[in-house]
Image (cartoon, helix red, strand yellow):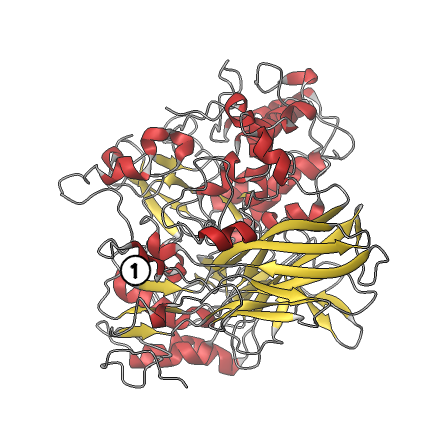
Amino acid sequence: MLKFTRKSLLNHASVWSRLVSTDVYKIHPAIGIARVGNSLSNDDWYAAPTTIGGTPTEYNANTKTFQPVTRFKNSEGQIRKQAAVFTVYKKGEELQIGDADIVNIKWKCWVANKKPIWWNFSLLCGDLMLGEDNSYEYWSKKMKTGTQTPVCNLRNATVTEAADRQKYIINPGPRECDLASGNFSAKFNYDLSKYNAPTFPGEGALNGKLIEGTLINSLGDMTMTHESGKPVSLFVRGGHGYSCGERSANFASFAGADGWFDDTSDGPVECELTLKNGEVVTLKAWVLSASPKYAPNLVNISTWDDTVFDMAVRFRDFGKKLNMINKDNHFILGADGFKPHPETDINPIFKRMKDYQWVSNIAVMTQFATPPFDVCNNSPSKEELARRQTWFSLLRPAIDLKSAANVEAVTYDPHQDVYSNGANSFPYMPQNAGDGCVNADAASGPMSKFVTLTPTQYYLMYQWAYGHTSPTPNDYGLNDLDRASLGNCVGYPNSPGIETCWNNRNPNIYEHDDVYRLRSVPIDKLLKTGLSLTRDETARPLGCEPGDMSKRMAIPWLADFAECTTQPINFTDSNKNRTPPQYYSYWWPAQSPYNVYIGNYNENEQNLEANGSYGTETTGGSFVSGQNVYYQRGIQEIQDTNTNIRTMMAYWSELAFIVNANKDPKTKDDYPNYVEAERGLKAFVKLKTDMSPTDVPVKNLMNPNPTQPYSVPKTN
């Protein structure tokens, strides 16, 4: 097995030293998260949250400040886009337009969607953290049990010529804004740029084919600040959430289908500062445009922030600097090791587990997250420590903390056990599906049935459980915006995930010292080489290209969103998943809710809900405020994968957002009440009325006559 060790990684230190940004100027967040929305107004958007679990903000023209969002949809019921906001900092302070040291400011951004030319998603296959024999090429030569179908193959594999496959990349090319020229905004669309000719599916991959969906002709836009005295910032908005593809495609799984496209994307952001002395400083960041976060204030148990933090602890010198890792690269246990602060390092994990109750029915984890002792007590008694240690024993082990194994020697425990001490005991926590729990058997790829905390989270819990804590918060020396941006994204599990996949925990993609910043191929270099069809950014630390961080995700994203909410997993046979007996687990309910509570309906809304949802024996067809219900009700009623995914593509924007209905300033923070809001009730009434079990709903057809092949419109 190929193991990532500090020695092998440091062989590339010269590469890192050339790419690390200057200490004087930096862009934060290092990775910004935009989210798609089908609102058609360029002014109808809000800014990404600046704290983990925080509410996104929107600009108030009257107060000229950003204030918390109150509605996530516009008056037409369309979802508003979330903009990623990048700001340049000078020695830790916001750089202002008009700064005496700055002559000009130029922003560049190059986003792309590489999904159609990458490998079909096959769970953990291709994750080189598990060894070089876990490569895509290896699994492309292995057949699924009882079939002649490869475990892993390329998407759109029948398209073999490189020039033709390039047409499957949605690639508007680099766009720029420039203070001196007065060009303050740019669109990631069909418009020709001075750099390249854009490629979109309508002009190449789908030309002459029967198609459905909404034809994609843009991946979003960007706008820079330009008024004197304002922070030097860039606002990047993503696509509309559109999907389009061949009408003949059959969606057989959550991974999607060949011949299809969506308008999620990612890519590098660069800011060129021309200084008064003539020097040009190029700063780097990254933007990723993902699906909406339907529960904006709820946080995943292990976030992308947690996976980056864990990577930095185990694969950089960060862990040694914090006294978590010793010279032999083992976690330091006990009084000599790192001391977490209960309130800021430990309690958030309890809160995240507890908050899953608003978006999933996991009563056993709610019980686990509300233990009979004070989590934040920094002077626990012997009896309380004993209770903490009992609690810790119920966490599914992420790593053997007491073994001599080097923390960098990546091995993959299948995490098979459900119960902590036999079938009649308390189940291990957390109760989420593992990255490799969908494989039918071990012959189909690495197995990982249930998720754990990250190894570093697990280590911090150990130290807390045995009383080795700090009375004051720890200063990690990390940027708050960098952490907040990723702290609202999925870290574990990744199958494939929501924003990005398991590549988010690979050390090769991050800068060496600036650990939250992605290593990126310079835009000027990409202009000479073009985008690669085959290059794996996780194999060596050579930098990411546009589209690399999202290329492993489902295509379209709605396929995974429709199908991956819960998962039954075999827990008695380590080599099988899909055979009984099985245990019920959840994926990422803080991003994709499963069980939710109906909000405060009036009489008309309650009647619309009853007419737009399918009744059950337990509800009798009645849906009332405060009732716990299935989040995707109205969409996933037929239980046919192909139909469910197509229905989701048509009605994703009608789903509700989960918000705190308690607006009382005295109690809303300590006693939240998260319920549905802004559900498209009328749309679901129409869907239930119009759809039969054999219908395939098609919405927003770009072609007036869908029975005729699409052809590129003639232009003068």
Please say if 183 is above or below 450. Answer: below
Q: Position of residue 683 (x, y in %)?
A: 42, 79
For residue 452, side relative to residue 286 (left or right): left
In this figure, which residue is indicated by the disc labeled 1? Answer: 164
Q: Position of residue 432 (x, y in %)?
A: 44, 42
Q: Position of residue 622 (x, y in %)?
A: 41, 72
Please say if 556 is above or below 280. Answer: below
Nearest the viewer among 544 and 123 is 544
Nearest the viewer among 459 and 235 is 235
Q: Residue at 82% across / 55% down in the picture? A: 276
Asked if one can make out residue 423 in the rendered structure from this viewpoint, the answer is no
Nearest the viewer among 31 and 642 is 31
Where is the N terminus found, in terms of image quarters? top left
For residue 535, side relative to residue 99 (left or right): left
Where is the C terminus found, in terms of image quarters? bottom left
Q: Mark 1 falls on what kind of element?
A: helix
Q: Amino acid at mark 1?
A: Asp
Q: How many marks?
A: 1
Please say if 360 is above or below 211. Answer: above
Asked if one can make out residue 162 in the rendered structure from this viewpoint, the answer is yes
Q: Residue at 70% across / 34% down in the picture? A: 342
Q: Position of residue 319 (x, y in %)?
A: 63, 26
Q: Residue at 75% across / 62% down in the picture? A: 665
* Residue furthest out toward the right: 100
Please say if 423 is above or below 304. Answer: above
Nearest the viewer among 257 and 568 is 257
